[in-house]
Structures are given as C-alpha cells and as structure tokens.
C-alpha cells in the first residue's frame, strides 16, 4: 500500500511538561507546535484512503520525506528561479532530524495502519529537498 500525505512534515518526540493544579499532575505536550497538526493530517489522510482493520504481524515501512527547499537557497533578481550552486545539495543536513520525522509519522499511523509501531521490523526512510509539493510518501508491506 502506498499513501501520499501533502504538507510540511513536523518532528515528534521532544516533549515539555507543565503542572496542572486542577488535575494535580504534570501534563506532557509536544515541544513543537507543528507536531500535532502534522500527526492529525497524516492520520486523516491515511484513514480516508485505507479502508480496513489495522494490520497484524511484521511490517516493512518506507517513508520519503519531501522537504520544501528554503527561499534563501535561490538567487535574486534574474536568478530568482535558480538554486545557488553553494546550496544545491539535495539532502537536507539541518533540523528536523530524520528520526524525529519518522517518530511523529509512525505514531500518527498507530491504530489506523497497524496496531502498534513496534510491528515495524524493516524500514527505509529518507528526507530530501523538493521545489514544490512537500509531504511524505508512505509505503507499507506485510513481511
């Protein structure tokens, strides 16, 4: 099965906590405010395209994160459509970390594509720059 989720991928994993005096305990929330909207988008997109029960057994997962190339990578004036040679690399070596992108996306699919992300036994992931249409391509196979 293959799914495309359009949008800007957001990292998951980092948390911050605050004390809620009404509940009398610490509440943990994602550190990045883009994490929850990204996870909701992933869940809704895949749930709309997948009409079945969560998979059981070992899973092979492939995720291709397509990150929108930043505007400062482009020239100015007549070169506004050309990528600066010094910034022409295809692979983003900046945050967010690939593992954090994986974490938020895998967690968003729990209960929709699989029962638990511990079922993922084989994985291939990558992140790379695109000039338009950012998002993630998710491919899932039972092993």
Image: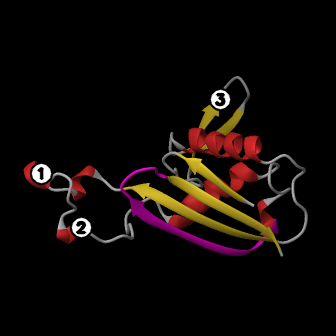
Q: Which mark is residue 87?
A: 2
Q: Is residue 125 above or below residue 80?
A: below
Compare residues 1 and 62 and report the one nearer the observer. Answer: 1
Q: Residue at x 30, y 53 (%)?
A: 70
Horizontally, residue 69 falls left or right of residue 57, namely: left
**Residue 20, picture quadrant:** top right
Q: Earlier in the sequence, mark 2 or mark 3?
A: 3
Residue found 77% across the figure and 61% down from its top: 117
Q: Nearer the viewer, residue 35 or 38?
A: 38
Q: Percent from the top left, x then y, of residue 103?
A: 63, 59
Start and end of the magenta stretch? 119-134
What residue is pinned by disc 1? 76
Q: Nearer the viewer, mark 2 or mark 3?
A: 2
Estimate the x, y position of residue 80 in percent, counting from the top left.
16, 51
Q: Main secondary structure of the magenta part?
A: strand
Q: What residue is pinned by disc 3? A: 20
């Amino acid at each position: 099965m293959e799914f495309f989720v359009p949008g800007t991928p957001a990292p998951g994993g980092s948390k911050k906590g605050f004390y809620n005096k009404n509940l009398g305990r610490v509440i943990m929330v994602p550190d990045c405010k883009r994490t929850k909207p990204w996870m909701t988008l992933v869940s809704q997109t895949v749930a709309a395209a997948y009409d079945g029960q969560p998979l059981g057994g070992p899973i092979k997962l492939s995720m291709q994160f397509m990150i929108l190339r930043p505007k400062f990578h482009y020239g100015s004036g007549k070169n506004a459509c050309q990528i600066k040679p010094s910034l022409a690399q295809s692979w983003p070596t900046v945050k967010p970390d690939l593992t954090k992108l994986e974490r938020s996306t895998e967690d968003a699919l729990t209960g929709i594509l699989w029962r638990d992300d511990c079922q993922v036994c084989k994985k291939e992931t990558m992140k790379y720059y695109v000039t338009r249409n950012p998002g993630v391509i998710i491919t899932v196979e039972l092993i």
